[in-house]
Image: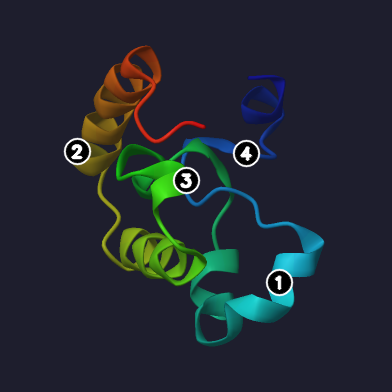
Amino acid sequence: IFNVLWGNMSLVGPRPYLPREKAQIGYATHTILETVPGITGLWQVSGRNEIEFEGRLQLDSWYVRNWSLWQDIVLLMKTVNVVFNKKGAY
């Protein structure tokens, strides 16, 4: 939450990628990395660890290209549900 308050992250957005993953992003690098990373996002509420890396790239790219405030509100509500039901977690 402190990173959100300091402006380094947002509540909703693509999760930060690890340095070793940045080489694998490829075609989606510019799209995904042009936004501030988020604490939660489309990938997290769509299956988290059940989604392969390529699927994560597609979800993050789609989110950035189709951003809307309403979508962020829906994703925040879905995040609460996913966390409490432990969907997609190990």
The secondary element bearing badge 2 is classed as helix
Q: Considering the numbered disc 4 on the image, is that residue within a helix, a strand or a loop?
A: loop
Looking at the picture, how far across and down is residue 5, in whole percent?
65, 23
| Kind of residue at badge 4 | Met
Badge number at residue 6: none
Q: Position of residue 70 (x, y in %)?
A: 19, 38
Marking on residue 22: 1
Instruction: Give, as a three-letter code, the residue at label 1.
Output: Lys
The residue located at (66%, 57%) in the rendering is 17
Q: Position of residue 4 (x, y in %)?
A: 62, 28
Q: Residue furthest top?
A: 84
Q: Earlier in the sequence, mark 3 or mark 4?
A: 4
Q: Which residue is mark 2?
A: 70
Q: Are marks 4 and 2 in contact (CB under 8 Å)?
A: no
Mark nearer the viewer, 2 or 3:
3
* Circle 3 residue: 49
Q: Earlier in the sequence, mark 1 or mark 2?
A: 1
* Above or below, 4 relative to 41: above
Mark 1 vs mark 2: give the one in front.
1
The answer to which of marks 1 and 4 sits earlier in the sequence is: 4
Pointer 1 or 3: first along the chain? 1
Q: From mark 1 to mark 4, how far is it between C-alphas? A: 18 Å
